[in-house]
Structure formats: structure tokens, C-alpha cells
Image: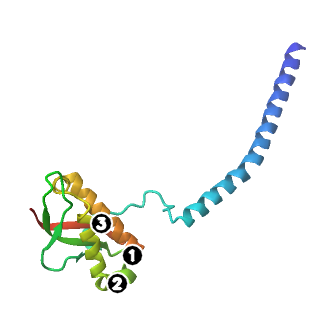
Amino acid sequence: MKKNLMSVLIMALVFVNVVLSAVIMITLVPTAKQSNELITQVCTAIKLELESGKVYNANTVPLDQTDVVLITGEDVQTFTLKRGADNEDHYVVTKVSAVLNKEDTDYAEKQPQIQGREALLQEIAINTFLKYTYEEIRTPEGQEEIRSDMLEQMQELFDSDFIIAINFSETNYQ
């Protein structure tokens, strides 16, 4: 008799547990869906990328899917750097180029706009170099920071990420 009573008690507790779990699921799932919708709307409003992991750079796009555009033209250009600890003027002489992803959805529409905005792109390069000192630009970390700063500004200008990298070539520092 005791074993049957214990079995009935255990079954009753299992049944109560299932009912309470169902109640919790019924009340929490709609709230979670509403929270997800709200987060999606907020992200859309502030233009955050909703697809995580969608990062393009020159290393993730095959070479045959890229196009290179010289921002500074065929000749090297001299850029003034921010004064450093020595309080002297320093310069960098380089060619600045942008690597474009030809497979990006915005490429066909935005690539022709580059020719019309060359002055703005050069202005971005000039202003970016003015933020960094001679000591900062000589380090690999500083060069990478300059590249990413320019890339971010150019992507904002075109409101697209079809520009995937910024490169410097024929670089000399003074």
C-alpha cells in the first residue's frame, strides 16, 4: 500500500511539474518574440548589421573578385602628419588605393560614383593622415589603424561596404 501511495504521489508531482513548465513556456515565448522584434527594430533604426560574421576584407575575397582604384591618382602624393613630440613637421609620401569587391551588391551602382568623388576621397586621406604623428605611422599597428580609419570613412561616404581595404604603396616618411 505504501509503494502505491508513493507512486501516486510521484506521478502527481510529475504532472504538476509538467503543467507548471507548460504555463511558463506559454507565458515566456510570446514575451521573448516581442523582445526579439523590438531588438530588430532598434538595430534597423540605428543601422546595425544584423548578420553577424559578415566581415569582408582583402583576405576573404578572392583576387579575381576585386578591383583596385587609385585614390591619389597615378603619382605619389605628399601628406602632412600631425606634429609629434619633437614638434617638427613630418610628411608621408605615398599612393593610396582602395580595393573594391566586384561581387558586392552595391558595386555596379557605387563604383561609377568613385570618379565623381575623387576629391572627397583625397580629402578623407588628407584628414586621416593629419590625425597621426610620425612615430605612430611608422609602426605596423599605426598603419593598420590609419587604413581602418580611412576604410570606415569611405564606407560611410558611399553608405556601403563594397570598399573592402585601403592600401599604401611607394611609401616614404620624412
Which residue is situated farthest in the front direction here?
Answer: 87
Q: Residue at x 27, y 81 (%)?
A: 118
In the rendered image, is residue 59 in sight? no
**Up/down of 32 relative to 159, above or below:** above
Q: Amino acid at mark 2?
A: Gln
Q: Residue at x 49, y 61 (%)?
A: 51
Q: Residue at x 30, y 61 (%)?
A: 148
Q: Amino acid at mark 3?
A: Met
Q: Residue at x 59, y 61 (%)?
A: 42
The residue tagged with tag 1: helix, strand or loop? helix
Q: In the visual, does 33 lie left or right of 81?
A: right
Q: Amino acid at mark 1?
A: Phe
**Residues at marks 1 and 3 touching, judged by CB atoms closer than 8 Å:** no
Residue 29 x, y percent position in the rendering: 71, 50
**In the rendered image, which quarter contains the N terminus?**
top right
> Residue tagged by mark 3?
150
> Residue tagged by mark 1?
158
Q: In the visual, does 94 lie left or right of 103?
A: left
Judge depth for marks 3 and 2 and give the one in front.
Answer: 3
Locate residue 84: give its quadrant: bottom left
For marks 1 and 2, give the CA distance: 9 Å
**Up/down of 28 relative to 64, above or below:** above
Residue 116 x, y percent position in the rendering: 31, 86
The residue tagged with tag 3: helix, strand or loop? helix
**Residues at marks 1 and 2 touching, judged by CB atoms closer than 8 Å:** yes
> Residue tagged by mark 2?
113
For marks 1 and 3, give the CA distance: 13 Å
Residue 144 x, y percent position in the rendering: 25, 57
Q: In terms of sequence position, does the residue under pointer 1 or pointer 3 come before the other?
A: 3
For marks 3 and 2, give the CA distance: 17 Å
